[in-house]
């Protein structure tokens, strides 16, 4: 809803303000949605193990193993239910920082998401 409203306001401003003698510049970056990134859970590992993204990016983990796995942040900022084969879990990172995570069922499985400012 927020994206639609923002895009609509920018669209109207881009076409209405020039008629009033006022200029406005709208770039694709101003209205582009954040990218989506995937992490595979396969052979008892997160791939890639370390991921660097920008704020607003949604990461989706997909379990390709036959055994269930979880995606659990060590700081408790996110936690998936047990994901069966083909199961997916998504989380949108809204702040800068480093977020270590692991599988609660197999604690040797670890990963990290590094979130940078746009």
Image: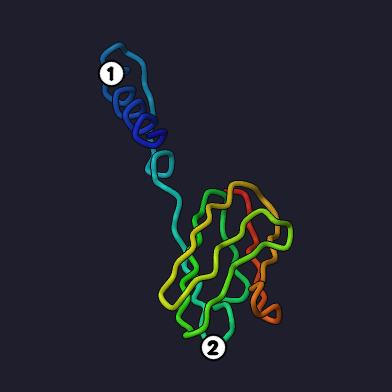
Q: Quadrant of residue 116?
A: bottom right
> What is the x, y in percent for residue 55?
57, 50
Task: Tell me the residue at 26%/15% (across/down).
Answer: 19
Task: Tell me the residue at 39%/40% (across/down).
Answer: 31
For disc 1, the marked residue is: 16
> 41 above or below 25?
below
> What is the x, y in percent for residue 46?
57, 77
- Relative depth, front residue between 53 and 19: 53
Judge left or right: residue 60 versus residue 44: left
- Relative depth, front residue between 93 and 17: 93
Task: Tell me the residue at 70%/56% (across/down).
Answer: 76
> What is the x, y in percent for residue 50?
63, 72
Nearer to us of marks 1 and 2 is 2
Q: Secondary structure at mark 2?
A: loop
Task: Tell me the residue at 39%/31% (across/down).
Answer: 6
- Relative depth, front residue between 11 and 49: 49
Mark 1–mark 2 Cα distance, whole angstroms, equals 55 Å
> What is the x, y in percent for residue 98?
70, 60
Q: Residue furthest right?
A: 75
Judge left or right: residue 84 versus residue 100: left
Residue 1 tag number: none
Neighbourhood count class around disc 2 (C-alpha, 10 Å): few under 14, some 14–19, many 20 upward: few
Residue 43 tag number: 2
Q: Quadrant of the N terminus?
A: top left
Q: Residue furthest bottom?
A: 43
Q: Secondary structure at mark 1?
A: helix
Q: How many marks?
A: 2
> 105 above or below 118?
below
- Relative depth, front residue between 9 and 72: 72
> Which callout, 1 or 2, points at the residue further toward the start of the chain?
1
> 5 above or below 60?
above
């Amino acid at each position: 809803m927020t994206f639609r409203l923002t895009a609509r306001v920018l669209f109207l401003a881009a076409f209405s303000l020039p008629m009033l003698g006022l200029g406005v510049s709208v770039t694709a970056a101003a209205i582009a949605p954040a990218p989506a990134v995937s992490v595979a859970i396969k052979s008892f590992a997160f791939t890639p193990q370390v991921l660097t993204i920008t704020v607003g990016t949604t990461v989706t983990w997909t379990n390709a193993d036959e055994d269930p796995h979880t995606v659990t942040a060590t700081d408790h900022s996110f936690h998936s239910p047990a994901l069966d084969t083909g199961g997916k879990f998504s989380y949108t990172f809204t702040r800068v920082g480093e977020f270590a995570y692991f599988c609660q069922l197999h604690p040797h499985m670890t990963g990290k998401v590094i979130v940078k400012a746009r």
